[in-house]
Image (spheres, rainbow, N blue to C red):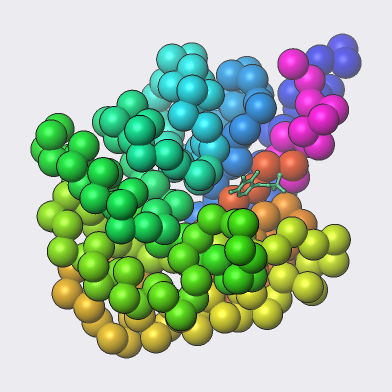
Amino acid sequence: MEKYGAECMITDNVKKLLDEIPEGVAVVAAAKTREAEEILEAISAGIGILGENYVQEMLRVQEQVKGEVKWHFIGHLQTNKVRKIVAGCDMIQTVDSLRLAREIDKRCSAIEKVIPILIEINSGREPQKAGVMPEDAVDLIKEIAVFPNLSIQGLMTMGPLAGDPEDARPYFVETRKLFDQLKESDIPGVEMKTLSMGMTNSYLVALEEGSNMIRIGTLIFGPRACSLN
Ligand SMILES: *Cc1c(COP(=O)(O)O)cnc(C)c1O
């Protein structure tokens, strides 16, 4: 009975979330550390996109979870692992360097695929964190836009992790401004249609600031440390 209770919880969580968010907002279920059964339940409840942080985990879960779901890579991607995931990936949300972009382009070219990507913005300007600094984003995007096997479709940001969701707001606002600015500058080969920001703690604030893609783990699956295995 315990088990069934927990399983229903994921279904309820997904339904509640999908009911609550405005039309036109996509939900990426952040699936790190979750088991296949949990992920399958989220899919049955209406989740259409899975977000994976780790290459090995993504490949393992893809063996177990097939069917009508899209796969987004949302973790830090090392260039030497790109080859392993491009075929099974519908979007890479974390492109933040020319070197990484070039490798993804090369590997996609080899399999004749054009892959949608987002540019990850280090909106908190934290030196150790992933993402391109906001002031360097336009130049990077112009350089990446020429790669024939990449399709730039928007921006992604994490923002500094904070206890209070309000603390995330300035970083979402800044990323949204950059998004609008890029949309207006109409760089050839660049579409600005997806703005991926907001997690369990911060998605309501992110939605207020113009996010149209939220990445949700805990709110769907429960706390990671306590998740049922
Ligand atoms: C884990 C993760 C999320 C979701 O985090 P929750 O707080 O569990 O909702 C979103 N985005 C990225 C990049 C993540 O690694």
Q: Position of residue 70 (x, y in %)?
A: 41, 38
Tell me if residue 156 can be seen. Answer: no
Which quadrant would the C terminus be assigned to in this image? top right
Decide whether residue 224 is among the magenta residues.
yes
What's the residue at 21%, 47% (across, down)?
105
Q: Position of residue 18 (x, y in %)?
A: 62, 51
Farthest right residue in view:
2
Instruction: State which quadrant residue 228 falls in.
Output: top right
204 horizontally vs 211: left or right = right
> Main SS of the magenta segment?
loop
Decide whether residue 105 is among the magenta residues.
no
Farthest front residue in view:
127
What's the residue at 43%, 15% (across, down)?
63
Q: Is residue 19 above or below residue 87?
A: below
Q: Which residues are magenta?
A: 219-229
Q: Is residue 40 above or below residue 144?
A: above
Question: Who is closer to the viewer here, 70 or 33?
Answer: 33
Q: Is residue 59 above or below residue 200?
A: above
Instruction: State which quadrant residue 20 falls in.
Output: bottom right
Q: Is residue 44 above or below residue 200?
A: above
